[in-house]
Every structure is written in C-alpha cells, then in structure tokens.
C-alpha cells in the first residue's frame, strides 16, 4: 500500500451558485449600457440577459455539477472594464502587405484595439473584420440581428448569458456569400492585466463562403504576479448553407489568468465547421462548446488538446446536437497532464428525433504523467433516433505506452527524447490543423517548452 | 402467428397473479417515528437496531428527494404500508408453509427448482422470509443462509460487525428509508476457505397493493471462500405504484470470490430503487450479474469498492426498457487500492417509448497505482419512440492507470432480420433472436434454468412490443 500522498490544502469548495466575483450586478450592466450610449433595445437585451444569468446556477447541467470547481479563481480584485472609450474607436488602418500570410488581423489589448488590418483583396470582396462597436455604427440593423434578434447562444449556458449582459468589447467577422478568403484571419486577445474583460465574437459566413480564423489568447504586459485576471469570451458562429469555416484557437495566457469561454456554432445545410483548440496557459479554464448541426448534411469536426502543468485546471465541455438529417460529428479531446494539473473532459452527443442518418463520434483520451495529476472524462450520449450510421464514444486514460517507448529506444533515441516525441505526437492532431505557419510553430514551441519545464520541475514522473 | 401470441399470452398470465392473503400484522399507512418503533417492537429487536433505525429515519426526513435520474414525483410515501407480516413464524420445512403461499410459489416454479439443484431457498413473501430450507451439507460445512431478521438474533456478532458498514443509512435517501423500515432479506455467511458448491438463491415477490418492500441482504464471505448468490423477482400486476427500496451489502474478505446474480422482473408499476454495494478486500473477486427487465423505474448501479490490493470486480448489466419503463442502471467501480482491476459490460435494449440509461462511475483514488479498468456499453434501440442515454463518469487520479471506455448505440440491422426471415423466421422471431444474441454476454453467465427463464422473459417483453 502506497503511503497517502500529501496534497496541498485547498480553499473550501464553493457552492455551485457562488461565483468568484461579486461585481457583476444590474448596476454594472446599466453602467456599461450608459457609458456606451446604447439604444433602448440594447439596454433591454442586456438587462434581460442579466436576469437570466442571475437566475441560473453556475452549472445548469446536473450531470456535471459534481465537477464544478472555481476554487482557484478569486476575482474580486479584477474589476471589469466599463470603458467610456467609444467602441468604434480603432487605430488608423495599417498597411497590409501583399505578402502578408494573413488576410486580416484584429488585435485587442486590454480595452483598446491595437491593430486592425485587412487585405485589400478581402476588403474588396466585402469581408468585414471590425469591432462590434464599429459594426453598430456602420450597419445598425445587421448588428441588431446578430447580437439580439437571432442569437445562437444556448439557453442553458450561464456564462453565455453573462457575456450577453455585460460585454464591453467585441469582434465581428462577416464573410459574404460565395466569398473565399484564402488566407487565415487572426483575432488576437492580449490579456493579463488584473482586470475583467467580458467580450463577444461573432462570425458569420454567407452561403458557400469559406474562411479560416486563428484566435490567439496571449499574455501581454501589465501582468501583476499573483493578481488574477478574467477573460470571459463568447464566440457565436453562424454558417449558412455550404459555408466552410476552420477555427483554430491557441490559448497561451499567463499563470494568473482565469478564462471562461463559451462557443456556439449553428451549422447550416451542407456546411462544415472545423475547430482546432489548444489549451496551454491560464490558471483555470472553463470552456464550453455547443455545436448545433441544424442543416441536413452539416458537419463538425472538433479537435481539442490540453497540456496542463503546475496546478492548472482545464474544465472543458462540449455539446453536439444533431438536428438535421445525415449530419456528421467527429469530436476528439486529448489531455496531457503534468505536476498537479487536472483536466475535466466532458462531452455530450444528443441525437434528436429528426436526425436520421447521423454519424457521431466522441473520443476523450488522457495521458497522466504525474502522480498528482487527475483526469476526468465524462463522454455522454442521449439518443432519440436509432436510425444512425454511427453513435459512439470512447475514452481512455493511461500512461505512456511502453511498447512505443521500447520501439523508439530500439532505434537509438534516448528515453527522454522518446517520451517527448510520444507526448508531442499525442498532441499533434491540433498542431497540424493550425493553418498559419507562424502560429503552428509557436504552438509547437509552446508545447515543447511546457514539456521541458515539466522535466525540470519533476512534474513528469520519470520512467520506471 | 396467432398461435404464437396466444401461447405468449398464457405465459404472461402465469406471472400475473395475486392471492388474497390474511395479514397477521401490519403497520398503518405512511411513515412516522411510531411506525419505525412499531416495526422494531414487532420483531423484538435489540436496542442497537432500534437506534440504527431511528438514526436512519432522522436522516431520511432531512434528505431531499433526488432530482436526477428518473421521475420520482409520483411516489406517495404516505400511502405505503411499511411493514406487514404474513405468517407468524419462520417455516422450517416445505410442508409447514401455508397452502395459499405455497400455491403462489407453485406458479413461480420454486418446488421444482428446489428439487433440481437448489442449495437453499429463501423465499420472500411480502415483508418476511416465510420459507427457508438449507441443505444439510451446507449446514455441515458451516454456511449460514437464513432470513436477515433471524440472523440478527442467531449470529449477532458477525451480523453486527458488518451490518450497515458497507451502505450506511446516510448514503442516500432510499438507503436511509430502507435502514429505517427494513424487513426480511437474506443473510449469508461463508466460513474461511469454504466453497459453496451450488448457487444460493432467493425468490422475492411483492404482494399486496401499495406494499413497499424493504428487504436487506448481507453477504459475508470469509477469507478464501467462494459463493454464488442468485435473486430473481416476479411481482403481480397492479394499477397503483409500489415501491421497492432494497439494500444489499456484500463483504468479500481476502482471497474470496462472490458472484451476485439478479433477474429483476417487477411488474411495470414498481419503483425499484436499490442500493447494492460490495467491499472487495485483498485479492478477492466480486461479480455482479444484473438484469433488469421489469419495473416502471429502476435506479440501480451495483457498486464495487476495491479496498484491498489485487482485488478485482466485474459487472455485467443488462436492461430492457419497454413501454412506460425507465431503466436507469449501470455500475460503479471505485478503486481504492493498488493493482486492482475492474471490468464493466452493459447492454441495454429500449423499445415502445421505453428509456434505457447507462449511468456509471469509474474512480481511481490517489494511491491506487497499477489499476486496470474497462467499461463497455452497448445499446440497442428498436424504434424511434424510444430513448437511450449513456452517462459514464471516469475520474482518474493516478498516472499509471490503464482505463478504456467504449459505448455504441445502434438499431437492429435490416440485413440481419432479412437474412433470418429468408431462413423461414417471422419478423418477430428474427428480431427476438437478434435481441437474445445481443444480450448473450449476460445469459451465458447464468445457470441453465435461469438462462431459459431469462430468455422467456425477454420474449415476453418483445412480444408486448411487436405483437
């Protein structure tokens, strides 16, 4: 019998309805609306959303309530931006070189927009990459449709309602029907100053449009060691018939960052969405992805990796709802855990009565590399329509495969290198899907750096 | 076609019976502190048991009704008679069993089964064990198999040592209810090194409208011993809801082997809310073989707590959910010691608007190194009115755990049905055969007589849907 492992004392567990901050009140919501001089409909939308938010528990899904854990977050010092700055204020457009690997870049640092460029080609095709504030000024009716009249946010996502109530910054990417944006568009959030950023991203692709987006969440200046910052980011994706979107996200924020991420996609007939999500940074990430396969023959592929170390907690949930006929869902979540890291991978596939001919798969795989790491996998199925091509999930948690190690070592690779190759290979599916070479390389370097740090700290258990 | 259906109807009638029994003693409807005290007094229990019941009763009052799983809001706890005693004393031989009760068992086929192979029969008629026969050789080798009430009096040391330690009253609301009003059930003790050569089996029945059944089973298997316990249930059909809230505690001491087989076929008005749990000590093996075809709602996940190094657990769980039924079943494996293994296989069939839910938990606690665990869930849906859910919880806190989980959901393939029909089977027969094949992983674990009975139950269930 191994001796009990000493664990560091933790703060007492919070009740699920208790959030790590108190500043989110109706007064704050009203103040945000006032500062931005918003029309009545928007104020009402915010207040209605706030009422919904206030009435809900942190985790409305009873399946997952035992795993609500916000103990690492203590955000009362991270006051929200209630910026008086005009949301439409953006820097002067920077020249976008013809050889730029991107088709556009929007960078938001703290409460300010710091870079906004778009290629001449994309602009000419009618692609808009703007802040929500700009969109409100230039195309109010469209803005209203996007954020209030026809929202895709799930009704049972508490933090999505929070975002809708209290957002102060946002990004809109609109690709008109039939337009193919051939180079990636980058949306970069620079965070870390001990403040609360509540933001909203809306991505709309018209019929037959194609685009790829790289979302970067990075640590900027102004970090105060030990002082926590919150980023609550809601992303709403609408794909019209036959649209194609690739959306990569690289999260490499600082050690005191708390992240709530809500992503929803409504996928139209024949449309295709590919997520490639990488979680490396932050102290605590609570993420939820909702894919609604509304149109017939729509497809979603979601590939997600977590590389956790120290005392990071990544709490990731995905919901995939099959509504249309002959839809396809392929979801893969992988986690590598060092030190005392924890990852909760929760996934739910729902096949509704209308979803005849569904093909749905969910895989959750974990690699625990330290004694104190903890992996939780809850892959669930709720099925009302048996006439499907496939409805399955699988999961596994295990150490590094000894036979793979043996094979590599037999080829003259040192044990440490062999382990590194196996771990990085395990996480490669997301790396390979990042469309921008720069970002891909940075992700690879980030993963290698984490591995190296794990070796130094002893967070990786040495091979027996 | 018609003839097949008539035949099936006859078989169905065979199970739908209800005898008028004169109850000698029963409590008033509803549950109060007085009811609990009254039950204890009826039974002439020692004070510690009364205190145990009262502690459980207090917790029951405090504990909210579970809101997850199935719909429990139609249970009216005030309408239930918590205790009734159909005959005054424990019968020692078949001849002494009252004729009325005997007639009921006749329909269940007990005497026949007994003649064939049974080691012992503990037949539960309502809230008391009325009949027990233990084969002489079992008594000789020291095996104790008797009603739980009797065991409390005749084997107080071992009884008190383990009773309520595996499932404490505070475990959940229905374990608390059971602990407060429990009555009947089986007690098994197998001494060190003894292998019980034949399965021990108990038949359970609920009789009497609105009778709750709260039996309590305790099985203690000493070091190196081996036993197979079987329970099968049938119940008469009534219009109003009945509640069955049992607690089963199994203690598998070092190096022992226990198999617990259940065929649950309550009538479709019964709420079956059962807590089953085993502690598996070092190098012991615990196997739960669990089938649920009856009841309106079953919420049950047999649990194995692997507390000793090298222990292993296996669960085979099958569920058939027909019209108006919800089977919320599954398994739990909690690894608390190093080098423990567990394997869970679950198969469910849902049809005619029935709902089959797999709900399972696999937990590897810190310190439980070298764990190997696997979970496999397959679901078959026979029509698009039905529903199938899978909720596995997997929580791993050790780096050298090897865990795999797989789940699939599908329907009966048209090709298979077509093939069988081309060989002369009707569509019903073909579907029935495919379902039986799907559940075979379970059936093959049963003694032959049970396998036949189980296949007949499945056939009955299927006939109800496809006829």
Image (cartoon, coloured by chain):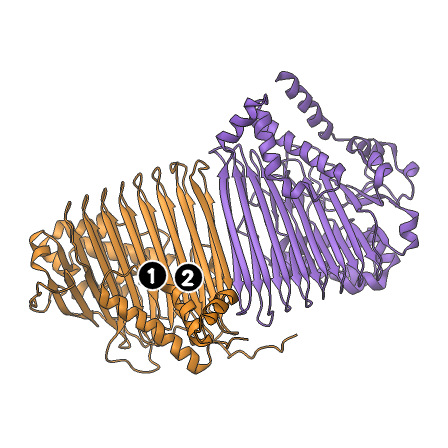
Chain colours: A orange, B purple
Give the quadrant of residue B343. bottom right
Q: Which residue is under mark 1?
A: A430
Q: Which residue is under mark 2?
A: A334
Find residue A402 and report its horizontal and vertical position in percent.
52, 67
Q: Is residue A105 left or right of residue A356?
A: left
At 70% from the left and 50% from the top, the residue drawn is B246
As rendered, which of B347 and A400 lies closer to the eye? A400
Find residue B363 and report its horizontal and vertical position in percent.
57, 62
Q: Is residue B249 left or right of residue A348?
A: right
Q: Is residue B99 left or right of residue A363?
A: right
As rendered, which of A40 and A217 lies closer to the eye? A217
**Quadrant of the drawing holding the N terminus of chain B:** top right
Q: Is residue A46 left or right of residue B60?
A: left
Chain letter belonging to callout 2: A
Find residue A81 and report its horizontal and vertical position in percent.
23, 71
Up-down relation of residue B286 to residue A406 (above or below): above
Label 1: state its secondary structure: helix
Q: Bin the neighbour count of mark 1 within 10 Å (Cα to Cα): few under 14, some 14-19, many 20 and up.
A: many
Chain letter belonging to callout 1: A
Compute the Cα span from label 2 to label 1.
Answer: 10 Å
Find residue B422 and report its horizontal and vertical position in percent.
55, 22
Label 2: state its secondary structure: strand
């Amino acid at each position: 019998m191994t001796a009990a492992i000493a664990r560091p004392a933790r703060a007492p567990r919070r009740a699920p309805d208790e959030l790590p901050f108190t500043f989110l009140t109706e007064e704050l919501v009203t103040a945000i609306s006032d500062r931005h001089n918003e029309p009545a409909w928007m104020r009402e939308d915010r207040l209605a959303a706030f009422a919904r938010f206030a009435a809900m528990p942190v985790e409305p899904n009873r399946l997952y309530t035992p795993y609500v854990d916000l103990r690492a977050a203590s955000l009362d010092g991270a006051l929200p931006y209630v910026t008086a700055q005009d949301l439409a204020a953006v820097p002067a457009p920077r020249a976008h070189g013809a050889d730029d690997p991107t088709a556009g870049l929007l960078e938001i640092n703290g409460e300010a927009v710091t870079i906004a460029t778009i290629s001449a080609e994309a602009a000419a095709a009618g692609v808009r990459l703007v802040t929500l504030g700009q969109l409100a000024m230039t195309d109010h009716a469209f803005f209203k449709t996007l954020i209030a009249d026809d929202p895709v946010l799930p009704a049972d996502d508490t933090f999505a309602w929070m975002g809708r109530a209290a957002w102060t910054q946002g990004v809109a990417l609109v690709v008109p029907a039939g337009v193919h944006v051939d180079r990636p568009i980058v949306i970069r959030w620079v965070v870390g100053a001990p403040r609360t950023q509540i933001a909203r991203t809306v991505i709309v692709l018209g019929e037959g449009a194609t685009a790829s987006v790289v979302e970067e969440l990075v640590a900027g200046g102004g970090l105060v060691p030990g002082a926590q910052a919150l980023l609550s980011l809601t992303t709403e994706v609408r794909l019209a018939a036959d649209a194609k979107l690739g959306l990569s996200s690289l999260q490499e924020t600082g050690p005191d960052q708390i992240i709530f991420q809500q992503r929803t996609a409504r996928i139209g007939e024949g449309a295709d969405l590919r997520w490639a999500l990488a979680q490396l940074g932050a102290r605590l990430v609570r993420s939820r992805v909702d894919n609604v396969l509304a149109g017939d023959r729509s497809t979603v592929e979601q590939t997600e990796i977590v590389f956790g170390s120290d005392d990071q907690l990544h709490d990731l949930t995905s919901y995939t709802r099959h509504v249309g006929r002959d839809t396809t869902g392929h979801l893969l979540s992988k986690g590598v855990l060092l030190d005392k890291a924890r990852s909760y991978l929760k996934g739910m596939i729902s096949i509704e009565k209308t979803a005849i001919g569904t093909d749905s798969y969910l895989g959750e795989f974990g690699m625990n590399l330290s004694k104190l790491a903890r992996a939780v996998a809850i892959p669930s199925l709720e099925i009302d329509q048996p006439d499907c091509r496939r409805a399955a999930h699988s999961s596994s948690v295990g150490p590094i495969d000894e036979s793979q190690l043996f094979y590599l070592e037999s080829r003259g690779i040192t044990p440490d290198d062999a382990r590194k190759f196996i771990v990085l290979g395990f996480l490669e599916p997301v790396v390979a899907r990042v469309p921008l070479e720069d970002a891909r390389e940075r992700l690879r370097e980030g993963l290698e750096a984490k591995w190296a740090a794990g070796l130094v700290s002893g967070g990786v258990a040495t091979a027996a | 076609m018609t003839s097949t259906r008539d035949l099936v109807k006859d078989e169905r009638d065979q199970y739908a019976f209800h005898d008028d029994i004169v109850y000698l003693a029963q409590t008033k409807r509803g549950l109060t502190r007085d009811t609990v005290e009254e039950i204890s007094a009826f039974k002439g229990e020692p004070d510690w048991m009364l205190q145990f019941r009262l502690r459980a009763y207090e917790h029951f009052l405090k504990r909210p009704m579970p809101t997850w799983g199935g719909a429990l809001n139609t249970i009216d706890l005030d309408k239930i008679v918590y205790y009734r005693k159909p005959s005054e004393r424990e019968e020692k031989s078949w001849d002494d069993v009252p004729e009325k009760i005997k007639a009921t068992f006749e329909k269940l086929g007990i005497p026949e089964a007994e003649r064939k192979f049974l080691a012992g029969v503990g037949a539960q008629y309502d809230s008391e064990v009325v009949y027990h026969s233990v084969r002489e050789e079992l008594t000789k080798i020291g095996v104790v198999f008797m009603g739980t009430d009797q065991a409390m009096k005749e084997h107080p040391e071992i009884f008190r040592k383990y009773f309520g330690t595996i499932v404490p009253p505070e475990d959940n609301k229905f374990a608390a209810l059971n602990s407060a009003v429990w009555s009947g059930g089986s007690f098994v003790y197998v001494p060190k090194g003894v292998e019980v050569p034949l399965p021990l089996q108990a038949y359970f029945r609920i009789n009497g409208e609105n009778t709750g059944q709260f039996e309590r089973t305790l099985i203690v298997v000493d070091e190196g011993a081996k036993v197979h316990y079987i329970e099968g249930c049938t119940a008469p059909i009534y219009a109003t809801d009945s509640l069955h809230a049992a607690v089963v505690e199994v203690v598998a001491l070092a190096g022992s082997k226990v198999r617990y087989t259940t065929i649950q076929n309550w009538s479709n008005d019964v709420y079956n809310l059962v807590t089953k749990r085993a502690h598996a000590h070092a190098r012991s093996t615990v196997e739960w073989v669990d089938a649920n075809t009856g009841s309106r709602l079953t919420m049950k996940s047999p649990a194995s707590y692997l507390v000793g190094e090298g222990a292993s657990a296996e669960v085979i769980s099958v569920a058939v959910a027909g019209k108006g039924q919800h089977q919320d079943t599954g398994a739990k494996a909690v690894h608390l010691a190093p080098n423990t293994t567990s394997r869970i296989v679950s198969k469910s069939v849902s049809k005619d608007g029935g709902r089959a839910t797999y709900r399972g938990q696999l937990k590897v606690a810190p310190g439980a190194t070298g764990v190997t665990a696997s979970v496999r869930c397959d679901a078959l849906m026979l029509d698009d009115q039905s529903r199938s859910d899978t909720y596995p919880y997997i929580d791993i806190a050790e780096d050298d755990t090897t865990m795999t989980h797989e789940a699939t959901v599908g329907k009966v393939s048209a090709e298979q049905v077509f093939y069988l029909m081309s060989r002369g089977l009707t569509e019903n027969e073909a579907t029935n055969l495919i379902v039986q094949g799907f559940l075979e992983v379970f059936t093959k674990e049963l003694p032959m007589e049970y396998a036949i009975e189980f296949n007949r139950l499945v056939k009955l269930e299927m006939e109800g849907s496809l006829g």
